[in-house]
Image (cartoon, rainbow, N blue to C red):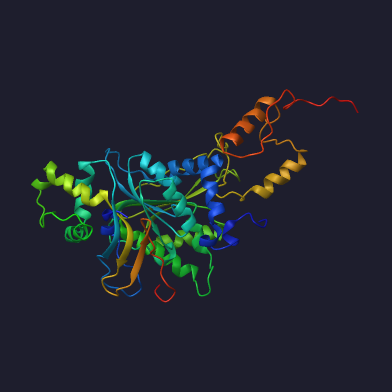
């Protein structure tokens, strides 16, 4: 699972008000190659929760993203490269996602998070 | 409706799509062709703005990732969800580009508001009409699904869901559930005059009131490329078997299916797929018997 997906996911257990962001418990993190596309990064940026992405990238072992992002930085190639790396090239292979409100763990196995709910949760 | 014709009545999706069923999606070239064709049409109906930019899309019931591959080909980023682990295993083996999640659509989509530019779904959403578990309420599951789908799309985004409704009540139920969730749009039926080529696409729009796209094949002509509806093998098998026996073993769907060339081609295909025990080609292959009797 990429951090792009992590940034969009929000806990959907019934009654949870604040299911975002999932805490990550990384066991195995992989780095993959993805096509670098600055246009896509600029297109997706307004939709991201930047703080959540920074924290997630740090837990996955890639700290160093700036806390604030300005308009000019989105034109800066060096920044966009590190942004691209964090968003699309870090993959959580094994581990778990933890709901911030209930503490419920969703296991991630072979890169696929298991988001199925128990019967009393939906 | 013959028994076995609809997988929806056989078993819940996470049980029906087992390893054996999932394997068909990588070995059956006909099934793959149909999936690709349906995805292409869904993308056409999705009508993403043609600005050459990559979009972030959602693939609901992505299965083995056949539809996702078509999205990758068009240069889009996607996230796929499916309830069958075996199907996702196949998708992983194929090394699809998109992210995969194991998830039940009826529980609602676990995404933040306005996350995706669009969503597609190929032959999946009709599963929501079934109550497979004790206490499962299809109407409630449908409502949750459409409400969360509505909120996770950006304004002006669209969702195109290709469905196989069992009857008109189901189509009506799905459409009205979508409308109640706030979507505009409706059902587009391609090839409405043909039983086999008929395809239902639920085209849903968030905000805006763009005109509904026109269905294909309105004038009654059949789709000449492929009239198949089989996205799940077995959906039409019983019918085909009946036709086959009636015509004394010769398929009237393949007029070319008698000659030596055709037999050699089929045997070559089977060898290519790795089947064993294919008889070797000799001078007797495909030869006609004498009319001695």
Question: Residue drawn at (11%, 53%), measured in percent from left and top?
Answer: A69
Q: Where, by quadrant of the figure, is residue B252 drawn? A: top right
B15 in relation to B288, above or below: below
Residue B154 visible to the viewer: no
Left or right: B90, with B248 as reference point: left
Q: Closer to the camera, B257 or B177?
A: B257
Q: Where, by quadrant of the figure, is residue B53 drawn? A: top left
Left or right: B245, with B29 as reference point: right
Question: Residue drawn at (26%, 64%), measured in percent from left and top?
Answer: A24
Q: Position of residue B135 (x, y in %)?
A: 50, 75
Question: Residue drawn at (65%, 28%), measured in percent from left and top?
Answer: B264
Q: Position of residue B50 (x, y in %)?
A: 30, 39
Q: Residue furthest bottom?
A: A120
Q: Position of residue B120 (x, y in %)?
A: 40, 50
B256 in relation to B115, above or below: above
Number of dots carrying numbers: 0
Q: Position of residue B293 (x, y in %)?
A: 91, 28
Left or right: A83, with B279 as reference point: left
Question: Residue drawn at (53%, 71%), measured in percent from left and top?
Answer: B133
Q: Residue furthest right?
A: B293
A76 in relation to A9, above or below: above
Residue A84 visible to the viewer: yes
Q: Closer to the camera, B272 or B99?
A: B272
Quadrant position of the N terminus of chain B in the picture: bottom right
Left or right: B86, with A19 as reference point: right
């Amino acid at each position: 699972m990429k951090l792009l997906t992590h940034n969009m996911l929000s806990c959907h257990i019934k009654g949870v008000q604040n299911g975002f962001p999932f805490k990550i418990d990384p066991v195995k993190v992989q780095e993959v190659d993805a096509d670098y596309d600055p246009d896509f990064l600029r297109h997706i940026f307004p939709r991201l929760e930047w703080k959540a992405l920074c924290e997630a990238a740090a837990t996955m072992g890639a700290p160093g993203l700036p806390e604030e992002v300005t308009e000019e930085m989105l034109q800066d190639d060096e920044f966009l490269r590190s942004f691209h790396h964090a968003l699309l090239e870090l993959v959580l292979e094994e581990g778990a996602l933890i709901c911030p409100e209930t503490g419920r763990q969703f296991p991630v196995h072979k890169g696929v998070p298991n988001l199925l709910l128990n019967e009393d949760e939906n | 409706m013959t028994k076995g014709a609809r997988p929806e009545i056989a078993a819940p999706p996470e049980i029906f799509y087992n390893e054996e069923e999932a394997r068909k999606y990588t070995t059956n070239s006909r099934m793959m062709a149909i999936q690709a064709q349906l995805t292409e049409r869904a993308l056409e109906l999705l009508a993403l703005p043609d600005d050459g930019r990559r979009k972030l899309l959602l693939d609901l019931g992505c299965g083995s990732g056949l539809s996702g591959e078509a999205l990758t080909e068009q240069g889009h980023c996607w996230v796929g969800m499916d309830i069958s682990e075996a199907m996702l295993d196949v998708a992983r083996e194929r090394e699809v580009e998109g992210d995969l999640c194991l998830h039940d659509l009826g529980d609602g989509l676990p995404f933040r508001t306005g996350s995706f530019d669009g969503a597609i779904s190929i032959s999946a959403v009709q599963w929501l009409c079934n109550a497979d578990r004790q206490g499962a309420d299809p109407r409630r599951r449908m409502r949750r699904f459409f409400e969360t789908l509505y909120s996770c799309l950006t304004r002006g985004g669209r969702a195109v869901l290709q469905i196989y409704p069992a009857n008109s009540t189901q189509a009506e139920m799905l459409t009205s559930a979508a409308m109640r969730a706030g979507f505009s749009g409706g059902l587009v039926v391609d090839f409405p005059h043909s039983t086999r080529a008929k395809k239902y696409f639920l085209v849903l729009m968030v905000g805006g009131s763009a005109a509904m796209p026109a269905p294909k094949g309105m004038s009654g002509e059949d789709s000449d490329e492929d009239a198949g509806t089989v996205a799940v093998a077995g959906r039409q098998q019983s019918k085909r078997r009946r036709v086959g026996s009636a015509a004394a073993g010769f398929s009237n769907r393949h007029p070319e299916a008698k000659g030596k060339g055709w037999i050699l081609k089929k045997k070559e295909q089977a060898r290519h797929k790795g089947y064993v025990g294919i008889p070797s080609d000799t001078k007797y292959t495909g030869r006609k018997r004498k009319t001695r009797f």
